Amino acid sequence: MHFLLSSAIEYWRSAEHLRLVNLTETIAIGHRREILQARSAMEAEVEAVNLTLSSLRSRCNMLSSIGQLPTEVLIQIFHALRLSEPPKYLPKNRHYPASLRSSYSFIGWFKVTHVCRQWRNTALAYPSIWSDIAFDLGPKWRDETLRRSETAPISIKWGGYNPYMTPDDAQDMPNILVRHLEHTKELSLSADAEDWAPLIPPLCGDAPLLERAALITSTNLDRLPSLPSDLFGQHSPRLRRLHLRGWIMSWSPLTMNFNLTHLKVELDYGNPRDFASDFTDFLRVIGKLQSLESLVLVHSMPILFSTTMLQESYSPNVTIHLPKLRNLVISDDILACAVFLKHTVIPSTATHQIHCYLTGKPIEHILPWVNSKIVSVSSPIRKLAITDIKPTGIHIMLWDETLYDEDHGYLSNHETPPVLDLSITGSTWDHSTRALIQSICEKLPLGSLKVLSIIDRDTTWSVQDWFDTFRDLSKVSEVEIGLACAPSFCEALSKADTPHSNGDRLVTGAQATVPLLPSLESLVMTHVTFSRTLLAFLEDRTTLRPLKRLEIKKSDVDDGMIKDLEKVIPVVGWDEKRSIFDSSGSDSD
């Protein structure tokens, strides 16, 4: 090694002497003009030496272990780095290093082109690695990645909050779509409603390579853009996932000529819609999508104005089948939901989330579908969970026997899909969550129920309400109760019903014969403020049917109260976490 170093030093010293001897003599002359010329010549020599050093380093790098990696392996490494470290804009934050704070940009995986000549040449030789167009770093980076990607399938994600975005960027976008939509694989555009006009014509061009698209209107205005019937030229044979938010849909037979597996169409509640859309045409459009695996429709179905019963209302003369559907989510007017569910056949294994808005229409519209879901299962309903939702609504879930496991019983195992997943939002002026709960529960077959969960902010629950709604649940052994309805529920537990008759009344003491939920053994209380009155209710329950276990979660209770409860109930658990709600069930902050 020493001999090699000595030989190299001797060679380069000799080369330096031979090369620079004339320059040294020129400097000795001392004339200013000749000195300046000699300096320029010397700087040229320095640059040449730097290039020689760069060449030597490249040769040295090629002899390293990583330098021996095949190009294909190096490209795979770059692809992985591209996913883990994409270029992005950094929000202003004083914790970033000064080198980053100066520009607030992070070039991410692009840094591989700055490591060595081999890496740079490898990255530049593969257009596919530049397929994620860098809009976040400004127009220069955007245009450079578009140039480097050449004709490879690209991903365009543009819009939303971006400090680099300028009016020029919006003006450039239509031209970018015209030139590159044909080789775009993934497209995500987000714009204000008033900014879509110049973007819509380019979106009507063919997109033969497009696989995924999202078109998002980012502002909630009364005037929304209308989706063109010739979106993507109706020629996107590879398009599988489409997400549309903030668009007025015509649902004409000419739309959606795609082989989609995932469709998501969203509007905000109260957004304008196309009143001319026909529900039958809408069903036929959806029915054409035979490969659908996931369907999400939020306030986007055609409007039905009838307020009569479902069987008397507008009824399409078509039934559609979606044989591959695995997930269904719809949120809309209760009549539109009911009509869609009545005329759509999906696999029994598909999961569903249905959110109905009453908007002056009766809850009975949705009951035929509810009954059909319950009848479709072979085992009885074992668990009912109802949670209130703002402003005035309830979320209902039912499970059958498949929920049970030996380790957790019926309370846990949330991964088991429910038989029914239904949300109902009423009108704040004529519905309370208590009334909604009572309306739906009186229609459900709950005779075999073993677990009941009610989380409700409604303070209008009375003892009589609890008996009227749940007096026949003789098999329920576990209950979860929470928020403002909990005190009246505990009071109802402390009392008893006479044998049920039309004229029955609540009694206590020696006359008490039938308590509410006579098989109840375990009680879970969440977001509850414990008081002496509440303690007295639980003490009175022991004279009827003693509880075996009390679990307290996220509630306002002190150590003294816990000790008093342990005198009444054999097993008391407390997570020692305070409630985020006040006694009325409102957010404490």
Image: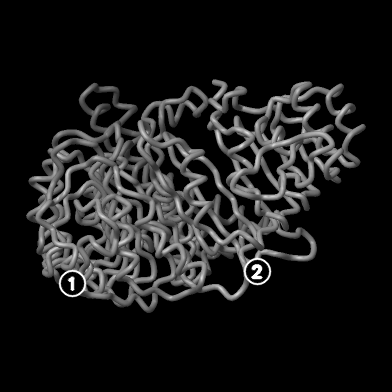
Q: Residue 276: x and y, percent?
A: 9, 55
Q: Nearer the viewer, residue 363 or 96?
A: 363
**In the image, 36: left or right of 552?**
left
Q: Is residue 462 above or below residue 325?
A: above
Query: In the rendered view of the protein, which quadrant contains the N terminus?
Result: bottom right
Residue at 45% from the left image edge and 69% from the top image edge: 372
Residue at 51% from the left image edge and 45% from the top image edge: 437
Q: Identify the residue under disc 1.
A: 257
Q: Within 10 angstroms of label 1, few (less than 14), some, or many (20 or more) residues?
A: some
- Which quadrant would residue 344 be assigned to in this image? bottom left
* Mark 2 secondary-structure assignment: helix
Q: Residue 83: x and y, percent?
A: 45, 56
Q: Is residue 488 above or below residue 45?
A: above
Q: Is residue 496 above or below residue 148?
A: above
Q: Which mark is residue 402?
A: 2
Residue at 61% from the left image edge and 37% from the top image edge: 464
- Which quadrant would residue 208 be assigned to in this image? bottom left
Q: Nearer the viewer, residue 86 or 583?
A: 583
Q: Within 10 angstroms of label 2, few (less than 14), some, or many (20 or more) residues?
A: some
Residue 328 appears in the figure: yes
Q: From this viewpoint, which residue is outermost toward the front? A: 503
Residue at 48% from the left image edge and 60% from the top image edge: 80
Hey, what amino acid is under mark 1? Asn
Say which label, 1 or 2, has the lower sequence index: 1
